[in-house]
Image (cartoon, rainbow, N blue to C red):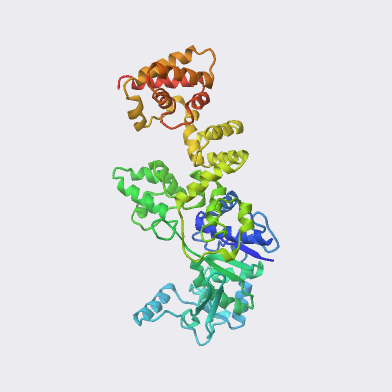
């Protein structure tokens, strides 16, 4: 049985590149009738963030990527958090030390830096100088008592070339002489990534490892450990890189760098206020602007929202907040480095599962084409069942803390229905938000005021509309349409010349649901109130 896994580190939100890795492992497991495991690699205690793991789980569930074993589900190979597996790792480290395949080291970071610099000065690759005699546990205890960092290194004695058999790239050969003895246990007592991942993959029965191309250089280290421990070697496939439209690797640094640039361009920005908004210190903000550090994502998002800046979507949650459907994201990500071979593009999850075949993976880099993603999203909005679309819409409203979230299920369904043709859920929310804010809080778009309300006769038209609305015996969309068309005929103008002043008056913008639906949504009393409010504000302009 094929067993795959996804093993993110909770040092930040789930990047779309990580989501792509999870998706391919999930598709292979589901296509083959195998198992998909989720494991959290949280041994980097200094970089782990409190909310990251929760967000990773939420993001995977939003995408529809479920796991057969892992956090919150359990399974026979737990625990599934590496921080809870320390005793397991210690047992295998002791085994390697006892077998003289690994040894203790007591070097300080400064001493290692000097050794590395000496190698650079000699124009040589740095290789740790293996001691002639391996220290015993008592020496390690003494070094620790003296305050020296105690690590453990694997003794790399392999002399033959290390051959990595990659399902996508074929055989890739590495020279063990260029690897050297590498650390497998850190001074904090936790294993390195190399050690932990090898042990976990073996004990959890992982048969196939699909991961990013950047991990190819780690694979010889993993095979050395697998040989030393007597473990089997799983099947490896290292995916191609996904690049942005600028040509570089799609990076999570794009969002903070975009924000940094925007702040520096806003000379009048109150930096003390920005720090307060982001819940960071002024010192942290200044450090960020000097490229010395990066605040966590909630701080980045909060400051950007305060400044009204749209940051490029990089993390999965960013796309959720921008109004994309999970079906569109899964469809789009699946085609980054893979294709079904029959020319199809728009596919649902089941179609992707049925078509998935590792032999259709591509070696070349994939472009993260945001226009194509938008096209996919537009198509999936049309394709998903109405009840599912409404569910997605309500989730979106909650995540972005929209006032539209107060709508019940029936009203939410109505909002989706009257905004047919929307490309994102954010567009639906934007068009309908006017009906869920207090009348006095309505904000008028400056361009809308200039183009519509300040045109000659616009205020007079609003006065006539108000009078005729009051005189309507029955307030219906049909009656409103008839009234507006009659007024347009009287003014010898198109319907838009009459409807646009009304639209701007009640919504503050030129974009909304169809005018008849917009007025109906707001109701007669609130429509009249906003018309009068607009007349009073702009009558003298």
**The N terminus: image quadrant:** bottom right
Residue 125 appears in which quarter of the rendering? bottom left
Residue nearest the observer in this picture, 512 or 493 = 493
**The C terminus: image quadrant:** top left
* Total marks placed: 0
Residue nearest the observer in this picture, 284 or 343 = 343
46 versus 408 height, above or below: below
Q: In the rendered view, does 443 fall on the left or right side of 379?
A: left
Outermost residue toward the bottom? 132
What residue is at 50 percent from the left and 44 percent from the top?
321
312 versus 292 height, above or below: above
71 versus 106 height, above or below: above
Outermost residue toward the left? 267
What residue is at 64 percent from the left and 70 percent from the top?
202
What residue is at 57 percent from the left and 38 percent from the top?
394
Residue nearest the observer in this picture, 353 or 29 = 353
Q: Position of residue 211 (x, y in %)?
A: 54, 65
Q: Position of residue 528 (x, y in %)?
A: 46, 18
Q: Position of residue 520 (x, y in %)?
A: 52, 24
Q: Is residue 50 visible?
A: no
Q: Is residue 197 visible?
A: yes
Q: Position of residue 238 (x, y in %)?
A: 53, 67
Residue nearest the observer in this picture, 365 or 405 = 365
What residue is at 45 percent from the left and 25 percent from the top?
439
């Amino acid at each position: 049985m094929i067993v795959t896994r996804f093993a993110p580190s909770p040092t930040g939100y789930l990047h779309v590149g990580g989501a792509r890795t999870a998706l391919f492992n999930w598709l292979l497991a589901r296509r083959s009738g195998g198992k998909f495991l989720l494991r959290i690699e949280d041994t980097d205690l200094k970089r782990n963030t409190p909310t990251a793991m929760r967000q990773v789980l939420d993001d995977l569930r939003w995408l529809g990527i479920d796991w057969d074993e892992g956090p919150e589900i359990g399974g026979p190979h737990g625990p599934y958090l590496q921080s809870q597996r320390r005793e397991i790792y210690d047992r295998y480290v002791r085994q390697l030390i006892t077998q003289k395949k690994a040894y203790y080291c007591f070097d300080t970071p400064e001493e290692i830096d000097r050794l590395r610099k000496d190698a650079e000065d000699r124009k040589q690759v740095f290789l740790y100088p293996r001691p002639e005699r391996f220290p015993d546990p008592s020496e390690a205890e003494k070094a620790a008592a003296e305050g020296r960092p105690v690590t453990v290194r694997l003794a790399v004695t392999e002399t033959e070339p290390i051959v990595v058999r990659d399902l996508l790239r074929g055989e890739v050969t590495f020279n063990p002489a260029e690897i050297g003895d590498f650390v497998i246990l850190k001074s904090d007592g936790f294993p390195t990534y190399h050690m932990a991942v090898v042990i976990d993959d073996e004990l959890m029965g992982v048969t196939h490892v699909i991961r990013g191309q950047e991990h190819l250089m780690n694979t010889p280290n993993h095979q050395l450990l697998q040989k030393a421990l007597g473990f089997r070697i799983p099947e490896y496939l290292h995916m191609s890189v996904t690049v942005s439209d600028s040509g570089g690797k799609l990076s999570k640094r794009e969002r903070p760098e975009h924000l940094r640039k925007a702040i520096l361009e806003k000379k009048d920005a109150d930096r003390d206020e920005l720090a307060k908004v982001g819940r960071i210190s002024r010192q942290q903000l200044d450090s960020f602007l000097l490229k010395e550090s990066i605040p966590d994502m909630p701080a980045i998002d909060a400051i950007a929202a305060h400044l009204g800046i749209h940051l490029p979507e990089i993390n999965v949650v960013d796309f959720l907040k921008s109004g994309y459907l999970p079906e569109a994201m899964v469809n789009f990500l699946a085609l980054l480095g893979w294709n079904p071979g029959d020319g199809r593009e728009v596919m649902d999850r089941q179609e992707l599962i049925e078509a998935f075949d590792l032999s259709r993976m591509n070696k070349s880099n994939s472009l993260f084409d945001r226009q194509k993603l938008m096209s996919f999203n537009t198509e999936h909005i049309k394709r998903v069942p109405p009840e599912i679309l409404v569910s997605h819409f309500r989730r979106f409203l909650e995540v972005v803390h929209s006032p539209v979230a107060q709508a019940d299920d029936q009203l939410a369904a109505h909002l989706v229905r009257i905004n047919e043709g929307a490309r994102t859920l954010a567009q639906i929310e934007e068009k309908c938000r006017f009906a869920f804010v207090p009348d006095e809080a309505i904000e008028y778009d400056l361009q809308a005021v200039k183009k519509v309300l300040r045109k000659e006769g616009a205020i007079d038209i609003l006065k006539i509309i108000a009078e005729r609305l009051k005189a309507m015996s029955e307030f219906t969309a049909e009656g409103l349409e008839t009234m507006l068309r009659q007024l347009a005929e009287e003014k010898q103008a198109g319907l838009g010349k009459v409807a646009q002043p009304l639209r701007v008056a009640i919504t503050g913008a030129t974009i909304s649901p169809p005018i008849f639906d917009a007025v109906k949504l707001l109701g007669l009393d609130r429509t009249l109130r906003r018309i009068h409010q607009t007349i009073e504000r702009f009558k003298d302009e």
